[in-house]
Image (cartoon, grey):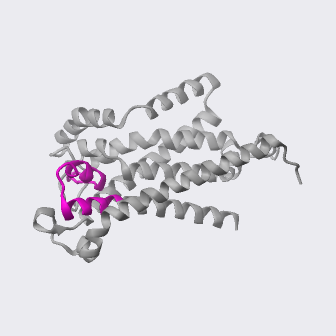
């Protein structure tokens, strides 16, 4: 047993307070969304959000499923592109690039991470959407949303994976090299398993950002409430719908928008739970 000195006790106390405050903020946000959503949750059957003919709040139709499907498709599509690219970038920085090139490349990724989302949306609207329109009209589409979200979550995946890989103890790498493993054998057999917790956390954070992104998706996705048949069809995401309609929403319409926010929060909580379950399975 280590003996705690007063400084350690103080630090542990501060960390506990911060952890409690963080949990309290999440609980308060959840309580606020439930409070604002409660009137419509009590008045309407939950099946209405699935079975209503469309999304026309002024006519009492509250089908959220087309927007939920658009949100999930855009997020999953972005992750399918960003995860392999981000992992490849992190592996390049840590194991393959010369030190000066690795530093420069990492700085560029950090710069990309700092660009505001509205700038990505503006670039997508003025450059990407017209390019897609030349290929397959109308341009503003699920594909545009996927590509913009990919650029937005790519730095997050790269930097978290880099941090996790760089934290792998040198002893493990040296022992793997002493056993005669190839560079890829060392990466796949030692580095990636050792860094899997940090990599998984980065992917979950990226997924949460993709699910909740508002302005960039609003600017490039076309904002049509429908189930997309192809990646060239316009969509409307849940977060974009909240931004578009909250300013004038009243009564049940306003409450249903809070239901959308509650649904997004629950999706993020499910992602976090899945990550925790996978980590427990790995250590089992």
Magenta span covers which residues?
Answer: 232-261
Residue 258 position within the rendered picture, expressed as x and y whole percent measured from the top left: 30, 59
The answer to which image quadrant residue 228 occupies is bottom left
What is the chief secondary structure element of the magenta stretch? helix
The answer to which image quadrant residue 281 occupies is bottom right
Please state if 226 lies on the left or on the right of 151 as rendered.
Answer: left
Looking at the image, which residue is at 43% across and 56% down?
29
Residue 199 position within the rendered picture, expressed as x and y whole percent measured from the top left: 58, 49
Please state if 50 lies on the left or on the right of 150 as rendered.
Answer: left
Residue 60 position within the rendered picture, expressed as x and y whole percent measured from the top left: 14, 68
15 and 158: which is toward the camera: 15
Please state if 254 lies on the left or on the right of 11 as rendered.
Answer: left
Q: Quadrant of the N terminus?
A: bottom right
Q: Is residue 68 above or below residue 179?
A: below
82 and 39: which is toward the camera: 39
Q: Is residue 258 magenta?
A: yes
Q: Quadrant of the C terminus?
A: bottom right
Q: Is residue 186 visible?
A: yes
Please state if 261 lies on the left or on the right of 270 as rendered.
Answer: left
Looking at the image, which residue is at 42% across and 48% down?
209
Residue furthest out toward the top: 100
Q: Is residue 277 magenta?
A: no
Looking at the image, which residue is at 18% across and 46% down?
136
Q: How many dots with numbers?
A: 0
Residue 169 position within the rendered picture, expressed as x and y whole percent measured from the top left: 76, 43
Q: Is residue 174 visible?
A: no
């Amino acid at each position: 047993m280590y003996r705690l000195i007063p400084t350690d006790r103080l630090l542990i106390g501060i960390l506990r307070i911060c952890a409690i405050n963080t949990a309290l903020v999440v609980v308060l946000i959840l309580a606020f969304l439930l409070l604002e959503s409660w009137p419509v949750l009590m008045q309407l059957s939950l099946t209405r959000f699935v079975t209503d003919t469309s999304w026309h709040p002024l006519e009492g139709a509250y089908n959220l499923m087309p927007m939920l499907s658009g949100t999930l498709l855009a997020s999953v599509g972005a992750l399918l592109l960003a995860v392999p690219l981000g992992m490849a970038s992190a592996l390049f920085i840590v194991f393959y690039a010369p030190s000066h090139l690795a530093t420069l490349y990492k700085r560029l990724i950090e710069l990309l991470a700092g660009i505001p989302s509205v700038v990505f949306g503006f670039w997508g609207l003025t450059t990407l959407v017209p390019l897609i329109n030349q290929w397959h009209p109308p341009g503003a589409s699920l594909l545009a949303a996927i590509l913009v979200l990919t650029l937005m979550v790519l730095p997050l995946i790269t930097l978290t994976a880099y941090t996790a890989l760089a934290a792998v103890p040198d002893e493990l790498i040296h022992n793997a090299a002493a056993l005669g493993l190839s560079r890829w054998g060392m990466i796949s057999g030692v580095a990636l398993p050792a860094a899997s917790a940090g990599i998984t956390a980065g992917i979950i954070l990226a997924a949460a950002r993709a699910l909740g992104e508002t302005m960039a998706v609003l600017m490039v996705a076309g904002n049509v409430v429908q189930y997309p048949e192809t990646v060239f069809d316009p969509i409307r995401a849940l977060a974009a719908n909240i931004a578009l309609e909250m300013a004038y929403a009243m009564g049940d319409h306003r409450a249903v928008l809070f239901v959308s926010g509650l649904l997004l929060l629950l999706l993020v909580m499910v992602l976090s739970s899945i990550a925790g379950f996978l980590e427990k399975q790995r250590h089992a």
